[in-house]
Image (cartoon, grey):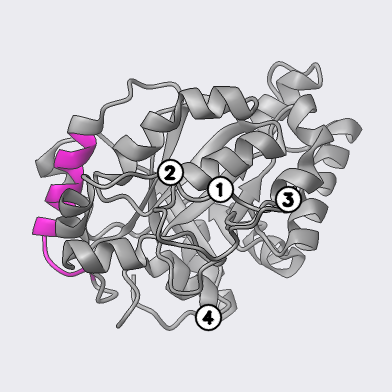
């Protein structure tokens, strides 16, 4: 069957992808309006805004009701951030309910903010998986425990994906750990504590992508407003370490791209770009994109 998650389809084809945030409220009507977004995926920001699974469900219903996208997919890919941080295993277990809530609305991925420890990352992955998925599950110290996502939300999510509940359960696993999975999990390695564990966190099975979060990384390193380049030396070193951890683990690196530097970033190996529409257009032409958007 064709991919549900077009971001995964593009990455599998070696094509960089570009995202933007949802503009406006989480309503059915605004979901319909976002069907033809220029972005390869939409980011729903719950880190600092109110966690609103009801609104998210309405937004996703609007996306699904608006008709097939120009790329031939049922909806654009949607990825959420969460209010919780990945501080440690206990914090992540206590807040795993957030993972279940947003996945049950039919989104295609989650980006974990302040992913500080590999223990928290493991719980994040386990909370996103159904127990029936065994790839990567191991009794070893670096393996995953059985998935902790419970039955009950698959019917709602399946309706958004346009599949049966049974097919949703089969396909709602983490990619690329499961090559047939449709869920993308990402990490923000964006403070001193997270940086110290960058290599171990990026290497946890089930992670698709990671970023270095320059705004928060800068604050952690003593720079209150250094989100954009040029960066102080210690910030550039932090970025290099996070990218190196991604490269070593086979995880896609996310970075901001703009019209003047998108080609340079692609050459550097950036495969996921926080972008403007102009930057995405330049990047797609540079990489020879064929899929419509």
Pick the front one: 185 or 69: 185
The reply to whether discs 3 and 1 touch (Cβ–Cβ < 8 Å) is no
Labels 1 and 2: the sequence-earlier one: 2
Question: Any mark on residue 13, and which?
Answer: 4
Question: Any mark on residue 142, and which?
Answer: 3
Q: CA distance from mark 3 to mark 1?
A: 18 Å
Question: Any mark on residue 229, and which?
Answer: none
| Residue at the image point whose x is 58% and y is 77% from the top | 14
Labels 4 and 2: the sequence-earlier one: 4
- Label 1: how many Cα within 10 Å (few below 14, some 14–19, many 20+): many
Q: CA distance from mark 4 to mark 1?
A: 19 Å
Compared with 242, 224 (above or below) is above
Which quadrant of the rendered structure holds the N terminus?
A: bottom left
Q: Which residues are magenta?
A: 55-69
Q: Secondary structure at mark 1?
A: strand
Labels 4 and 1: the sequence-earlier one: 4
| Residue at the image point whose x is 43% and y is 52% from the top | 129
Compared with 264, 81 (above or below) is above
Labels 3 and 1: the sequence-earlier one: 3
């Amino acid at each position: 069957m064709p991919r549900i998650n077009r971001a995964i389809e593009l990455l599998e084809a070696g094509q960089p992808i570009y995202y933007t945030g949802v503009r406006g409220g989480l309503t059915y009507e605004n979901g319909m309006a976002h069907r033809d977004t220029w972005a390869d995926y939409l980011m729903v920001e719950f880190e600092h805004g109110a966690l609103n699974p009801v609104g998210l469900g309405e937004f996703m219903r609007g996306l699904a009701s608006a008709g097939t996208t120009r790329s031939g997919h049922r909806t654009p890919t949607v990825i959420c951030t969460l209010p919780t941080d990945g501080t440690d295993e206990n914090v992540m277990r206590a807040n795993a309910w957030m993972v279940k809530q947003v996945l049950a609305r039919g989104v295609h991925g989650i980006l974990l903010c302040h992913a500080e420890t590999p223990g928290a990352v493991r719980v994040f992955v386990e909370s996103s998986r159904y127990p029936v998925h065994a790839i990567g599950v191991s009794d070893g110290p670096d393996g995953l425990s059985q998935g902790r996502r419970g039955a009950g939300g698959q019917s709602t999510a399946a309706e958004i994906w346009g599949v049966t509940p049974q097919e949703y359960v089969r396909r709602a696993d983490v990619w690329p750990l499961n090559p047939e999975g449709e869920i993308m999990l990402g990490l923000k390695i964006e403070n001193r504590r997270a940086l110290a564990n960058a290599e171990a966190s990026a290497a946890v099975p089930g992670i698709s992508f990671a970023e270095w979060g320059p705004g928060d990384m800068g604050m952690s390193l003593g720079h209150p407003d250094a989100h954009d380049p040029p960066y102080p030396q210690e910030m550039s070193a932090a970025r290099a370490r996070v990218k190196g951890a991604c490269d070593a683990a086979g995880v896609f690196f996310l970075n901001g791209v703009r019209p003047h530097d998108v080609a340079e970033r692609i050459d550097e190996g950036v495969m996921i770009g926080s972008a403007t529409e102009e930057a995405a257009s330049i990047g797609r032409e540079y990489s020879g994109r064929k899929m419509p958007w």
